[in-house]
């Protein structure tokens, strides 16, 4: 809870009258006037209906414009001059965090998810071959897991350890690929997914390699090793993916995965601040911010941007926690709207104040600043899938009008900003789907 200080009355008056909008914070939480009326989230998820909302269409944009917006976003990230997707010969490709000059399981698994969602089999297969050859451990204690950071030039593993979100996305993307394309076109996607899952269940901490999920708490770990096994990253919690595993992994752990989905939903309620809708980058399983990382993990920073998008996905696909998810979207969007729909920044303390220490966005000292980052603009707009207010349309408009291009000071991140921008456009156009067997 926020700690309040008793100010003298005249100071309080100055604070109230000094609002840039001429109104109090409570007033800015009131809904806005918009001819489109209140946002009306669907009552059932796609698992029941087989249908996906096109929020952009509901917002008044034409289907032709929406198709062009999605095509341009894909082009910018995968094909254009500032792309992060690079082909190697005729049969392989990788996604690179070009700013940090490495390839990450985050990026490769996101690339696979984009490819399977947009039915780009050739792109998927090239990415998987590179991932299999250079990232996946083929033997030893970490067999079937992935090195989270690899040199794109040589394939050398910068870090042989794993980040649990990579494994989460790899398994889900492979299961979707199996459902979409079958397993007899050159790659047995299902067998590859099962190999990761079966290996996961065989890892019990021996040689310092653990399960990706903490089996006691039924929550995804930060890293599958003795240290990371004891805490988590809220942005790794994608309950919808756990439901997918329960339906399509067929490995005998179906109920466990469903329990994990429910545990993640309960965890998100614990870790999200009740006044701002913000969450820490790293957290204990209790939901409390991870203090051992100090300033790095106890505030809302870059990892945290993904949380509203993940919750929106869970609503869109399964709608199993609708009441709280709608309340969450209202809470977060109200806070950001009060900060300024076109000025809210990308890092906050959980109580909504600006952090004293800013996590740098790049190696250039001038980039150590708060921004109205397109990646967070995108995911906060994705939350409109659950929106119940008129102002939810304004977040959709803010994303629609955003441009994936360098900021005024020259900083540019087509990798993280770009992938979250693309994902969110896919979500809001109805093109990020739960892929069932053909």
Image (cartoon, rainbow, N blue to C red):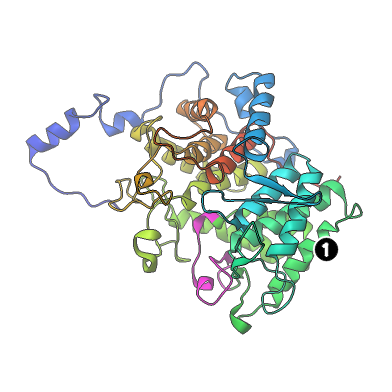
Instruction: Give the main secondary structure, helix, strand or loop, of the magenta stretch.
Output: loop
Q: Which residues are magenta?
A: 216-235
In this rendering, would 61 be left or right of 332? right
Per the image, the residue denoted by label 1 is 191
- Residue extending farthest to the bottom is 206
In this rendering, would 344 be left or right of 146? left
Decide if residue 47 is in sight here. Answer: no
Q: Position of residue 42 (x, y in %)?
A: 62, 34
Q: Position of residue 114 (x, y in %)?
A: 69, 44
Q: Position of residue 423 (x, y in %)?
A: 61, 40
Q: Is residue 228 magenta?
A: yes
Query: Quadrant location of residue 134?
Result: bottom right
Query: Quadrant location of residue 44?
Result: top right
Query: Quadrant location of residue 246?
Result: bottom right
Residue nearest the viewer, comparing 193 with 35: 193
- Residue extending farthest to the right is 184
Residue 111 vs 75, above or below: the answer is below
């Amino acid at each position: 809870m926020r700690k309040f200080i008793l100010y003298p009355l005249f100071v309080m008056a100055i604070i109230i009258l000094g609002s840039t909008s001429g109104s109090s914070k409570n007033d800015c939480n009131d809904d806005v006037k918009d001819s489109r009326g209140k946002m009306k989230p669907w009552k059932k998820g796609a698992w029941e209906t087989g249908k996906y909302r096109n929020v952009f269409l509901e917002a008044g944009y034409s289907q032709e414009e929406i198709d062009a917006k999605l095509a341009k976003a894909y082009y910018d990230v995968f094909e254009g001059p500032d792309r992060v997707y690079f082909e190697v010969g005729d049969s392989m490709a990788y996604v690179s965090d070009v700013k940090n000059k490495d390839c990450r399981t985050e990026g490769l698994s996101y690339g696979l998810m984009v490819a399977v969602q947009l039915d780009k089999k050739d792109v998927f297969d090239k990415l998987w071959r590179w991932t299999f050859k250079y990232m996946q451990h083929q033997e030893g204690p970490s067999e079937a897991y992935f090195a989270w950071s690899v040199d794109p030039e040589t394939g050398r593993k910068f870090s042989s350890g794993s980040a649990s979100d990579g494994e989460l996305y790899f398994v889900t993307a492979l299961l979707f690929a199996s459902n979409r394309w079958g397993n007899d076109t050159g790659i047995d996607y299902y067998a590859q997914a099962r190999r990761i899952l079966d290996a996961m269940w065989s890892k019990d901490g021996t040689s310092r390699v653990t399960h990706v999920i903490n089996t006691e708490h039924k929550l995804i770990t930060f890293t599958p090793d003795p240290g990371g096994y004891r805490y988590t990253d809220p942005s790794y919690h994608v309950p919808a993916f756990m439901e997918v595993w329960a339906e399509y992994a067929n490995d005998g752990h179906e109920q466990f995965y469903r329990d994990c989905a429910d545990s993640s939903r309960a965890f998100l309620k614990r870790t999200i601040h009740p006044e701002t809708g913000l969450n820490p980058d790293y957290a204990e399983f209790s939901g409390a911010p991870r203090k051992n990382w100090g300033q790095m993990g106890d505030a809302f920073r870059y990892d945290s941007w993904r949380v509203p998008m993940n919750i929106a996905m869970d609503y869109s696909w399964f709608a199993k926690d609708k009441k709280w998810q709608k309340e969450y979207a209202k809470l977060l969007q109200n806070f950001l709207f009060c900060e300024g729909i076109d000025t809210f920044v990308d890092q906050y303390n959980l109580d909504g104040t600006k952090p004293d220490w800013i996590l740098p966005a790049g190696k250039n000292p001038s980039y150590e600043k708060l921004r109205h980052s397109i990646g967070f603009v995108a995911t906060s707009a994705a939350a409109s899938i659950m929106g119940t207010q008129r102002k939810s349309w304004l977040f959709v408009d803010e994303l629609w009008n955003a441009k994936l291009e360098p900021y005024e000071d020259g900083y540019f991140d087509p990798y993280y900003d770009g992938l979250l921008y693309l994902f969110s456009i896919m979500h809001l156009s109805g093109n990020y789907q739960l892929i069932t067997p053909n």
